[in-house]
Image: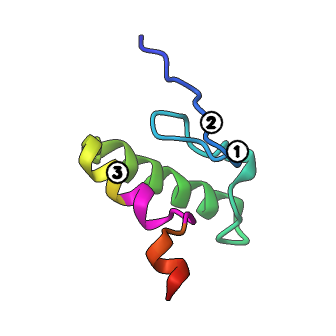
Amino acid sequence: MTTSQNTVAAGGVQLVDTPGRPASDRPVRFADPVQNARYWARIEAIVDSAPALSPEQRAVIRTAFSTVTTSSQEAA
């Protein structure tokens, strides 16, 4: 069994290799609880079958969501 690292970045954002959102925090997609449970089970199966991201892919995603401004952006 492997343990995931619960790493938190500045601003409280969870980084990669941390567990996903707990089931209790998931939005309700369907009024029927059985249908809602099937929906989330399908989402979990899709996510679990996806390959892991490479460090390069992770860097691209972090950059896309970064709120840091550079000096060239400030000058514009």
| Left or right side of 23 for 39 | left
- Report x, y in % for residue 3: 49, 16
Image location of residue 60, percent across then percent down:
33, 58
Give the residue pinned by disc 3: 59
Residue 35 vs 10, above or below: the answer is below
Q: Amino acid at mark 3?
A: Ala
In the image, is 46 to the left or to the right of 15? left
Classify 10 Å Cα crowding around label 1: few (below 14), some (14-19), many (20 and above).
few
Residue 67 on image: x %, y %: 57, 66
Q: Nearer the viewer, residue 65 or 28?
A: 65
Q: Quadrant of the N terminus?
A: top left
Q: Earlier in the sequence, mark 2 or mark 3?
A: 2
Residue, disc 1: 12
Residue at 68%, 56% in the rendered image: 26
Would you say 53 lies left or right of 5 here? left
**CA neighbours of label 3 inside 10 A, class few (<14), some (14 to 19), many (20+):** few
Q: Is residue 14 left or right of residue 42?
A: right
Determine which residue is flagged by label 2.
Answer: 8
**Circle 1: residue type:** Gly
Please name the amino acid that badge 2 sits on. Val
Q: Are marks 1 and 2 in contact (CB under 8 Å)?
A: yes
